[in-house]
Image (cartoon, grey):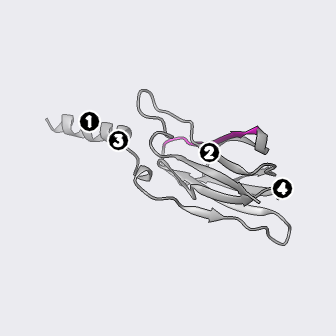
Amino acid sequence: MKLVKICLILLLSFAGPGLAEESGKKVFTATAGPDGIQKVSITGGEYFFDPNLIIIKVNVPVELSVKKAGGLAPHNIVISAPEAGIVFSETLDTEPKVIKFTPVKTGTYPFSCTKKFLFFKSHEERGMKGAIEVVE
């Protein structure tokens, strides 16, 4: 009976909803530094991105530093908005990786983690998603 309870707890920890689904938006508004580059850092972890809403200016270069918070589950960050000049797919690691792009069109562009474990909900379905909002 004890083994059944332990297995059930482990199963629910993988299949249950992520905490990020219940939390609010974590917004970051980028500003260009003296070098003219908007610098943003994103941390991805157990079914969250922090921040999960990033506001950047159109036609201003961006350096997006992405990293993994830790944990065993693999994560990535993926966005496909070629019309805006924002396309990348990067595996997250505990060491930051820098993604460079220049947004060319205003709008809101979603990003997410596309990982999924077997028959469980995808990381995106568990709350590991966000958006880049490009403004004038």
Marks 1 and 4, the one that precedes in the sequence: 1
In the displayed structure, would residue 32 be above or below residue 130? below
Type of amino acid under label 3: Gly
Q: Which mark is residue 16?
A: 3
Marks 1 and 2, the one that precedes in the sequence: 1
For this view, does 60 lie left or right of residue 9? right
Q: CA distance from mark 1 to mark 2?
A: 35 Å
Type of amino acid under label 1: Cys
| Badge 2 element | strand
Residue drawn at point x = 44 percent, y = 27 percent: 118
Q: Which mark is residue 59?
A: 4
Q: Which mark is residue 7?
A: 1
Residue drawn at point x = 31 percent, y = 40 percent: 12
Magenta stretch in the rendered image? 73-82
Q: Image quadrant for the N terminus?
A: top left
The question of residue 132 being in magenta is answered with: no
Q: Are there few (<14), some (14-19), or many (20+) residues within 10 Å of tag 1? A: few
**Do the CB atoms of the residues marked 1 and 4 lie less than 8 Å apart?**
no
Q: CA distance from mark 4 to mark 3?
A: 41 Å
Marks 2 and 4, the one that precedes in the sequence: 4
Type of amino acid under label 2: Pro
For this view, does 94 lie left or right of residue 70? right
Front residue (pair 104, 14): 104
Residue position for label 2: 110
User: How many discs mark residues in the rendered view?
Assistant: 4
Q: Closer to us: mark 1 or mark 2?
A: 2
The prevailing secondary structure element of the residues shown in magenta is strand
Residue drawn at point x = 16 percent, y = 39 percent: 2
Q: Where is residue 134 shown, x and y percent of the image?
A: 72, 54
Q: Closer to us: mark 3 or mark 1?
A: 3
Marks 3 and 2, the one that precedes in the sequence: 3
